[in-house]
Image (cartoon, rainbow, N blue to C red):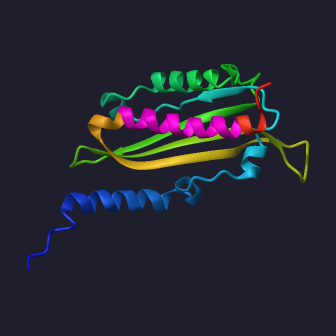
Amino acid sequence: MIRPKLFTPRRWIASAAATVLRAALPGAGFTEQDDPWDRASFKGVRAVDVQVPPIDESVERDGFSQIQLEADVRLRLWQAGIHVNSSSQVSSGRLFVLINAVKSDTLPLYAVSCDLEFRQPVRMMRDPCIRASATTWNRSIVQLVSSARINDFTRQSIADLVDQFISAYLKQNPKQ
């Protein structure tokens, strides 16, 4: 009996890359959690700023647009009734959209991590005079994606993560 070749070199590389990425990220990024403590940090937040840090140039060459992604996120929040600021002095928190992509040297693939983090000002319990910024809510998606689909995948993944953010935010700040 001839056994089919289950693990071709291409599948092995893809599997290995996904495993390495999963090991490098915190475990919470791979489960869909809706922790009440995470949601509670949204209570009373009246404005959100959106920030998309620069991404790798190779990803932009394959069709990804940082400006378009930020516009997509802002529009989605605005449509949900969440006030979006462009001035961090006015906002109660900042939603960071983090994209990390590593392109394969041999295959037309990217290992992509899409992260959404909500950071807001906090005070230390041991000394309330000390102020800092802390991530109080975050979600992640990690995937292997073809170079041709990097833009579509990234935009859809971020849209899915923003929908999770909107849901958690509106549970604590229902529309009046």
Residue 173 located left or right of residue 139: right
Could you say which quadrant of the image residue 56 lies in? top left
Residue at image location 62% in from the left, 41% down from the top: 117
Residue at image location 53% in from the left, 32% down from the top: 53
Could you say which quadrant of the image residue 17 lies in? bottom left
In this view, the residue in front, 29 or 160, is 160
Percent position of residue 172, x then y: 77, 38
- The image quadrant where one finds the C terminus is top right
- The image quadrant where one finds the N terminus is bottom left
Percent position of residue 40, x then y: 78, 45
Residue at image location 70% in from the left, 20% down from the top: 87
Majority secondary structure of the magenta segment? helix
Residue 29 located left or right of residue 86: left
Q: Residue furthest left?
A: 1
90 versus 128 height, above or below: above
Percent position of residue 99, x then y: 47, 39
Residue at image location 21% in from the left, 57% down from the top: 10
Q: Residue furthest front?
A: 176
Percent position of residue 36, x then y: 75, 51
Q: Is residue 122 magenta?
A: no
Q: Is residue 164 magenta?
A: yes
Residue bounds of the magenta highlight = 151-169
